Amino acid sequence: MTEASKSEGKTNGLARHLPLILIAIVAVVGALTLRDYITFDTLAENREELLALRDAHYLLMALGFVVIYVAIVAFSLPGAAVASVTGGFLFGLWTGTALNVIAATIGATAIFLAARAGLGRTLAARMHASEGTLGRIKKGLAEHEISVLFMMRLVPAVPFFVANLLPALVGVKLRNFLLTTGLGIIPGALVFTSIGVGLGEVFDRGERPDLSLLWAPQVIGPILGLAALSALPIVIKTLRGKKELD
């Protein structure tokens, strides 16, 4: 291989990592500078102006909301929960949920593609070539990709950015990522959006929204039930495998 080819290879390799490096830099800067701005206090202080803008320029406001939410998710900026609740506050339950899901899915896909182009490509290639533990993980994930991705989306204990990055690093298919993200975040989006629907009354009382509602038994129970349902194909195949060994 010539020196020119080696140099070109290194340049292309660095270029693949640039999107993820940019996301990491913006995430750090955003965490340090935006933490005190994207808050419920800020929303309460500006709610009349936001509602007036929504009434005067509904479509433009909806588009602006989606763009901002995409940026928050794509760059892992603080305020994703505030944005989700704001969707319900400004646009109501059903439109707000739709906008929240669309924006979060686009933002999550941006991180997924950035990670897959860089670290994901390298790690996935190593897992594919490996015959040891990494190879077994890759094979098992390929067999149950959709079930695993749905579980990651439905279990609240899994951080959203982890559910965006990890699939890219192990080489899951883009179409499966899009499917499970778009559908898997709907239950949580409904909860946060519904909180936003009644936000005006909460602000009138001088209070702040209670996001612990997500962990209420009547809410978390059905969500965990869906997570268990998504794990069912894995359980069935495992039990069949044991029977065949017996």
Image (cartoon, rainbow, N blue to C red):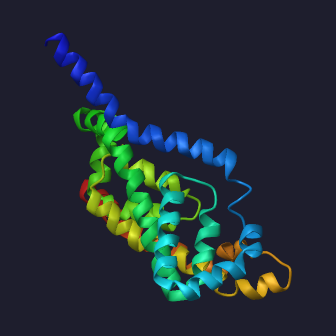
Q: Which residue is drawn at 54% across and 72% down?
A: 224
Taking the image as shown, residue 115 lies to the left or right of residue 92, namely: left
Farthest residue to the front: give it. Answer: 56
Of residues 81 and 215, the one nearer the viewer is: 81
Q: Where is residue 72 in the image (x, y as percent from the top left)?
A: 54, 58
Q: Where is residue 215 in the image (x, y as percent from the top left)?
A: 67, 72
In the rendered image, which quarter contains the C terminus? bottom left
Q: Position of residue 206 (x, y in %)?
A: 86, 80
Tally of marks: 0
Q: Which residue is drawn at 39% across and 36% down?
A: 18
Q: Which residue is drawn at 33% across and 64% down?
A: 178
Q: Quadrant of residue 188?
A: bottom right
Q: Can residue 228 be seen in this view?
A: no
Q: Which residue is drawn at 52% across and 82% down?
A: 96
Of residues 75 and 49, the one nearer the viewer is: 49
Farthest residue to the right: give it. Answer: 206
Answer above or below: position of 136 versus 175.
Answer: above
Q: In which quarter of the image is residue 36?
A: bottom right
In the rendered image, which quarter contains the N terminus? top left
Farthest residue to the top: give it. Answer: 3
Q: Position of residue 44 (x, y in %)?
A: 76, 75
Q: Is residue 149 visible?
A: yes
Farthest residue to the left: give it. Answer: 1
Q: In which quarter of the image is residue 205?
A: bottom right
Answer above or below: position of 190 versus 16.
Answer: below
